[in-house]
Image (cartoon, rainbow, N blue to C red):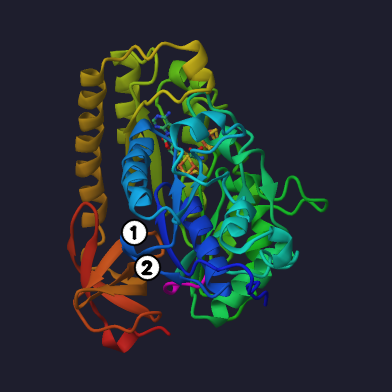
Amino acid sequence: MPTADSQKPTASRYYLWTVGCQMNKADSEKLAAGFERLGMKAVDRIERADVVVLNTCSVRQHAEDRAYSKLGRVRDLKKQKPGLKVALMGCMVGLKTDELEKRFPQVDVFARPQQFDGIMELVEGPAEDLGGEFWPTTYAVPEGPATYVPIVHGCNKFCTYCIVPYRRGREKSRTVDEIVREVAYLAVHGVREVTLLGQTVEAYGHDLPEQPDLGDLMRALSEIERLQRIRFLTSYPKDMTHRILEAVADLPKVMECFSLPVQAGSDAVLDSMRRGYTRAEYLEKIREVRALMPGAGITTDIIVGYPGETETDFEETCSILEEVRFDKVHVAAYSPRPGTIAWRKMEDDVPAAVKAERLHRVEAIELRISQEINDRYAGTVQEVLVEGVRGEQPFGRTRTGKLVHIDSPARVGSMVAVRIEHAGPFSLRGVLEDALVLA
Ligand code: SAH
Ligand code: SF4
Ligand code: F3S
């Protein structure tokens, strides 16, 4: 393990702030594990830190605004404490940083997603000192029995509205061996469920010499004895092959749980977004999933108020929600992202009030449908992995990804059978079936 050069005072307390998706959370956990390897300690109050790292998201303006307000706080702090070291990392940082440097002089280092070396240099001196094996053998310390593991970084799709490919670069898969090694380590340290992450997770392996697919990876991971569950997100309809779906259906450890963003129900909007599929093709994919795995949990993402979205287009989004009946819908109002194709070529012409109204209509449909789906769970017995305890109450998830609050004592990390007694739109509640503790 590398040691700090005694000539350089090593900053020892770090404050790490994270917004954005699971990928960002996973990046922060890896950076934190690197800091801990250097002997640094996490603090949960920014005022107590010697090093501040803000891990940012750019997917919508709202996410950036949160980072701006944090940066204001950091500017004030740095006036009182000039030695404070500040890094801005994640998706707000593009290839060029001159604009950011001008706007935020309180930041010492700007780091693109997963480009940790500049941050390590800030706290520890030249990054070469860490040695080439530092990052590949630095694994996040799992916080509980369920954790995230990135398997393919970046995205090649360039949907017109989306900033992600500009900030995370092209697709780059980790090797099967590397991922198996990490998951085996996590399993020894108490992890029972991994969520494999990629922006288009079925793109996994296309860029590797032997071209393994997601199914091959899940087969290899299924051999890890202590690991009990595998899930994956985010799915991209065009990349989700029958071969991958068969692997999901055949492998007992892989959960019947899909995150399959549709974004819009109208062909005109889908085409304008360059999503690469039609409404009919998307629906066909849903049929294929349900033919292999009836009752699979399926969630989706929707954008309302995309440029040019008419009332008729929007009604098609509402009708696809009624037709598919998703378990959960993440809905967002279109937010123009500088540099994207939509920002360059299309006018943000749906008024804010119309966007807000459409957003609420989607939420209302979803609330009703989620409640109806969850009602069908009432009275059933579900396999639940106990992920943690909030207050006195254990909670976990079913194989279909439903959150379950358990009204009985249950050990974190155990797989239990829960009889569902109450169903709400966002979660279920039930009691342990004592005779059926599974593991
Ligand atoms: N890779 C995933 C999603 C990544 S971004 C996919 O292909 O769907 C997460 C979600 O944010 C997207 O699904 C989309 O619904 C939303 N989103 C992305 N860009 C957006 C924008 N400019 N305005 C509003 N929502 C956006
Ligand atoms: Fe963005 Fe589209 Fe890539 Fe998803 S698939 S990350 S929405 S460009
Ligand atoms: Fe994730 Fe936000 Fe980047 S959603 S990939 S952290 S832009």
Give the residue at x 31% y 41%. Answer: 69
Element under label 1?
helix
Q: Is 230 in front, or is 283? A: 230
Q: Quadrant where the N terminus lies?
A: bottom right
Q: Where is residue 301 in the image (x, y as percent from the top left)?
A: 39, 38
Q: Which residue position holds label 2?
A: 43
Q: Position of residue 65 (x, y in %)?
A: 33, 36
Q: Disc 1 residue type? A: Ile
Q: Disc 2 residue type? A: Val
Q: Which residue position holds label 1?
A: 46
Q: Is 431 in front, or is 304? A: 304
Evaluate if marks 2 and 1 touch, with contact meaning CB atoms under 8 Å apart. yes
Q: Is 370 in front, or is 76? A: 76
The residues colored magenta run 140-145
Give the residue at x 48% y 38%. Answer: 92
Give the mark count.
2
Ligand 1 location (quadrant): top left
Q: Where is residue 420 in the image (x, y as percent from the top left)?
A: 23, 69
**Circle 1 crowding by C-alpha within 10 Å: few under 14, some 14–19, many from 20:** some
Residue extending farthest to the right is 209
Q: Main secondary structure of the magenta part?
A: loop
**Circle 2 crowding by C-alpha within 10 Å: few under 14, some 14–19, many from 20:** some
Element under label 2?
loop
Q: Quadrant where the C terminus lies?
A: bottom left
